[in-house]
Image: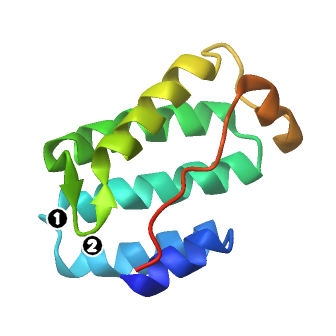
């Protein structure tokens, strides 16, 4: 998984999503991978200003990742879950899309993932 985190750290969220998707396809029962796919997709949606998509993905990522708390495979899952919960509080329910630079107005920050 080091390549996934390196791509994510460089802001290559779609590429990180695709690598995770390949891993998940070999282990369809692995909801941890599925949750990380959602996190990468959230950041990809953020690059496009898609608030509605970010909210939807955050809710599903919470369901996938919560069972892996507090930590799994070098990832501080408690921190990821807190970040997802914060997104759901900060992002408005009645806004579907904003210019990407406006996400900072809502206090949206990038979730750092480990460099393994």
* Residue 41 image point, x, y percent: 53, 56
Which residue is label 2 attached to? Answer: 24
Quarter of the rendering containing residue 84: top left
Give the quadrant of residue 58.
top left
Q: Position of residue 69 (x, y in %)?
A: 19, 45
Q: Nearer the viewer, residue 82 or 24?
A: 82
Q: Quadrant of residue 20?
A: bottom left
Query: In this figure, which colouring scheme has been used for the structure?
Result: rainbow
Report how many numbered discs are placed on residues in the image: 2
- Left or right? Give the position of 67 relative to 57: left
Q: Is residue 61 above or below residue 71?
A: above
Dot 2: few (<14), some (14–19), or many (≥20) neighbours within 10 Å?
some
Q: Position of residue 110 (x, y in %)?
A: 63, 49
Against 98, is 92 above or below?
above
Task: Please report the residue visible at 39 percent of the width from the left and 45 percent of the height from the top.
Answer: 80
Q: Which residue is labeled 1 in the image?
A: 30
Mark 2 or 1, nearer chain start = 2
Q: Which residue does the image show at 53% across and 18% down from the upper left?
A: 89
């Amino acid at each position: 998984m080091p390549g996934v985190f390196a791509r994510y750290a460089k802001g290559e969220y779609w590429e990180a999503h695709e690598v995770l998707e390949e891993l998940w396809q070999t282990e369809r029962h692995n909801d941890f991978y599925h949750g990380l796919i959602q996190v990468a997709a959230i950041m990809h949606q953020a690059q496009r200003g898609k608030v509605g998509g970010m909210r939807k993905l955050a809710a599903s990522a919470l369901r996938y990742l919560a069972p892996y708390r507090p930590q799994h495979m070098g990832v501080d899952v408690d921190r990821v879950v807190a970040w997802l919960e914060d997104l759901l509080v900060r992002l408005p329910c009645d806004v579907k899309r904003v210019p990407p630079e406006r996400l900072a107005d809502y206090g949206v920050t990038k979730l750092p993932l480990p460099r393994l």
